[in-house]
Image (spheres, rainbow, N blue to C red):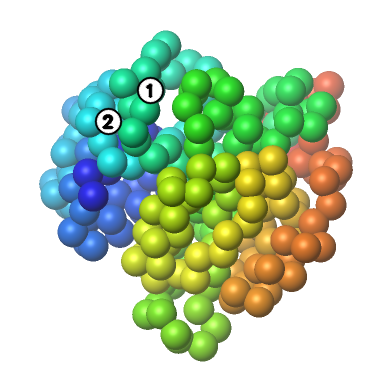
Amino acid sequence: MNIGIIGAGNIGGTLTRRLRALGHIVAVANSRGPESLSALAAETGATAVTVAEAARDKDLIIVTIPEKDVPKLPSGLFADAARSVVVDTGNYYPRQRDGRIEAIESGVPESRWVEQQLGHSVIKAFNTIYALHLLENGKPAGTPGRIALPVAGDDAAAKKVVLELVDQLGFDAIDAGGLDESWRQQPGSPVYTKDYDAAGVRHALSEAKRERTPAWSGSEHSAGTFEVPA
């Protein structure tokens, strides 16, 4: 596939490496410009591009940036991406990074909010696993204990593409329902960062509670740091 990745942090960099190793064409962008990605491009064979170029003429676009930066993306970035599958890997960290986002605090699922900001439907994936585990712990299909990852979204065809990609990367892909159910895989949920197998992921999703726990909710002092959350 021809893939654009917007964001080159832990998850974005890892997906660049893994997807290139699988033979996909990858264009990667960040907020600092292509020059800042020269080392990653040289290492992986990906092409360092602008954000606008990462969203242009792609089969699949992965948005992997902090929630607080989603509204800062260029207006109309996805206007010509009607046929592209868009993946949101993001998590809302109000106390540690993002500050309060009132719509999410009032109950809008994180990726539904992202979808509204982008003006394009999204599939939620890759948000429950540590980047190092995503890089190193993929296994062939059928391996006992293979880590499973939940994938949520409303577009069945787009979700099928992402489910297949997760499998290519070495993980069992679990259909986690529509985007309005994606709160089941948000930070603080039973599935978050647990590396469960398929049965464990399905059970964890069923045990999730919609209410955000205090540790993952905004406070009057949001945001802090990951070391000292507000």
Q: Of circles 2 and 1, which is in front?
A: 1
* Local crowd size for mark 1, using a 10 Å CA cut-off: few (<14), some (14–19), many (≥20): some
Determine whether 226 is above or below 203 in the image.
above
Identify the residue at image location x=43%, y=46%: 158
| Amino acid under disc 2 | Ala
| Amino acid under disc 1 | Phe
- Residue 78 is marked as 1
Q: Is residue 29 left or right of residue 154?
A: left
Q: Is residue 41 left or right of residue 188?
A: left
Q: Position of residue 140 (x, y in %)?
A: 37, 80
* Local crowd size for mark 2, using a 10 Å CA cut-off: few (<14), some (14–19), many (≥20): many
> Which type of secondary structure does the marked residue at label 1 adopt?
loop
Identify the residue at image location x=55%, y=83%: 145
Q: Residue furthest front?
A: 156
Residue at which label 2 appears: 54
Identify the residue at image location x=72%, y=61%: 205
Image quadrant where one finds the C terminus: top right
Earlier-in-chain disc, 2 versus 1: 2
Q: Residue furthest top?
A: 75
Identify the residue at image location x=50%, y=32%: 121
> Which type of secondary structure does the marked residue at label 2 adopt?
helix
Q: Position of residue 216 (x, y in %)?
A: 76, 41
Q: Position of residue 85 (x, y in %)?
A: 39, 40
Visible in this render: residue 37? no
Determine whether 225 is above or below 123 in the image.
above
Q: How many marks?
A: 2
